[in-house]
């Protein structure tokens, strides 16, 4: 059970001082990363202009997560600058391959994968990043697709006994996900992604999200960095996995205790709002007392979402190009940048 959320002023104050040398993480398993404290990372913004207004940001915030303009300046702007540099390099390299193969130079999308736990704030993170990247003249067309739409319909999950495993790797139509990314990456024009409703807790039959030749595609979901065999009946690792299509990947991270509290807070808010709608799949929770609702949320977190985080999501963190570490108040305290 996931219960996921779903032109500004210029700021060119001149070139900042060169950033101090970043510290190592001190963690053997993450020796591939350089760790930046928030202020160190913020200095890497260089002269990247602030292109979001407070009104813009207000429309992008999640249900319980309050991203501030300071977060945008300190964390998102340096990241958007890094991604812009990567985008330009990737497009140049793609042109080299086209020239070598003697074919017309094409324009294929740059794909960014964003992973992380339920309730960690990756949906809000993806929306803010999309808005900033779309304001760069190099790549004004930025599409955002979430993997929720690639979940199997509830009917299929029920037949397979997977309703309580929703959000786990085996609950997704991985073949359809790979086909979507392959068609998009190949520049096949208009491509459609299925759409998921958090109100009905199911795929919306007959509806789709149109994606038409974006400069950048942001692909956000729990298990987008997952590897290995996840389909029933398969005995070997698939030859093509979702992350094979990524040019860059980001993992939104936080301590388990923080994410649990955020999940419970969101559940309580939804119980007072969305769950009151008779069309909501979780309408039966509407009359729970605050104490009862808190207990239900804690059990769902522990039995389903925490298990998924530990078994499937967190082990993929070390595959990300950037790890964004959030603190108890949702602000980002440090950023890890992969060097190898």
Image: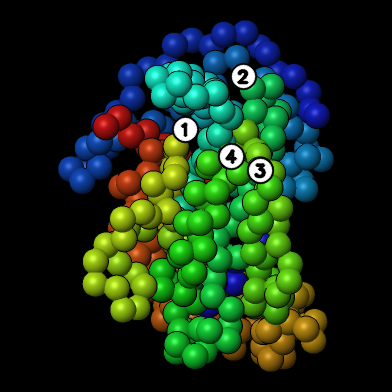
Mark 4 is surrounded, within 10 Å at the Cα level, by few (under 14), some (14 to 19) or many (20 or more) other residues, namely: some
Read off the residue under disc 2. Answer: 48
Mark 2 is surrounded, within 10 Å at the Cα level, by few (under 14), some (14 to 19) or many (20 or more) other residues, namely: some
Residue 259, x across and y down, in percent: 48, 62
Residue 296, x across and y down, in percent: 54, 85
Tag 1, which secondary structure? helix
Q: Relative to residue 50, is residue 60 depicted above or below?
A: below
Residue 256, x across and y down, in percent: 40, 62
Q: Relative to residue 319, is residue 200 depicted above or below?
A: below
Tag 4, which secondary structure? loop
Q: Is residue 338 left or right of residue 64?
A: left
The answer to whether the residues at label 1 and label 2 have Cβ atoms under 8 Å apart is: no
Q: Earlier in the sequence, mark 4 or mark 1?
A: 1
Q: Is residue 99 left or right of residue 264?
A: left
Mark 3 is surrounded, within 10 Å at the Cα level, by few (under 14), some (14 to 19) or many (20 or more) other residues, namely: few
Q: Nearer the viewer, mark 3 or mark 1?
A: 3
Read off the residue under disc 3. Answer: 189
The answer to whether the residues at label 4 and label 3 have Cβ atoms under 8 Å apart is: yes
Read off the residue under disc 1. Answer: 38
């Amino acid at each position: 059970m996931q219960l996921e959320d779903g032109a500004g002023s210029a700021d060119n104050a001149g070139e900042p001082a060169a950033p101090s040398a970043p510290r190592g993480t001190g963690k053997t398993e993450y020796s591939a990363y350089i760790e930046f404290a928030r202020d160190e990372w913020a200095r890497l913004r260089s002269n990247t202009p602030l292109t979001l207004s407070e009104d813009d940001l207000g429309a992008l915030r999640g249900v319980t997560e309050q991203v501030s303009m300071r977060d945008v300046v300190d964390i998102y702007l340096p990241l958007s600058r890094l991604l812009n540099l990567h985008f330009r390099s990737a497009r140049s390299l793609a042109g080299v391959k086209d020239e070598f193969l003697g074919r017309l130079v094409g324009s294929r999308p740059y794909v960014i994968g964003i992973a992380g736990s339920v309730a960690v704030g990756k949906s809000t993170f993806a929306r803010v990043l999309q808005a900033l990247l779309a304001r760069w003249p190099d790549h004004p067309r930025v599409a955002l697709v979430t993997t929720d739409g690639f979940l199997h319909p509830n009917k299929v999950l029920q037949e397979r006994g997977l309703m309580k495993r929703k959000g786990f790797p085996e609950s997704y139509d991985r073949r359809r996900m790979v086909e979507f990314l392959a068609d998009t990456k190949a520049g096949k024009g208009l491509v459609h992604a299925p759409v998921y409703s958090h109100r009905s807790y199911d795929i919306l039959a007959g509806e789709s999200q149109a994606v038409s030749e974006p400069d950048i595609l942001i692909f956000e979901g729990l298990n987008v960095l997952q590897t290995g065999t996840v389909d029933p009946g398969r005995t070997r690792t698939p030859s093509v996995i979702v992350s094979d299509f990524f040019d860059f990947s980001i993992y939104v991270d936080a301590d388990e205790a923080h994410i649990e509290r955020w999940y419970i807070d969101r559940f309580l808010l939804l119980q007072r709002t969305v769950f009151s709608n008779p069309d909501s799949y979780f309408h039966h929770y509407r009359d729970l007392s605050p104490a009862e609702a808190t207990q239900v949320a804690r059990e769902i977190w522990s039995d389903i979402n925490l298990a998924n985080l530990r078994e499937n999501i967190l082990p993929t963190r070390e595959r990300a190009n950037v790890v964004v570490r959030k603190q108890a108040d949702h602000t980002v305290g440090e950023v890890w940048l992969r060097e190898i």
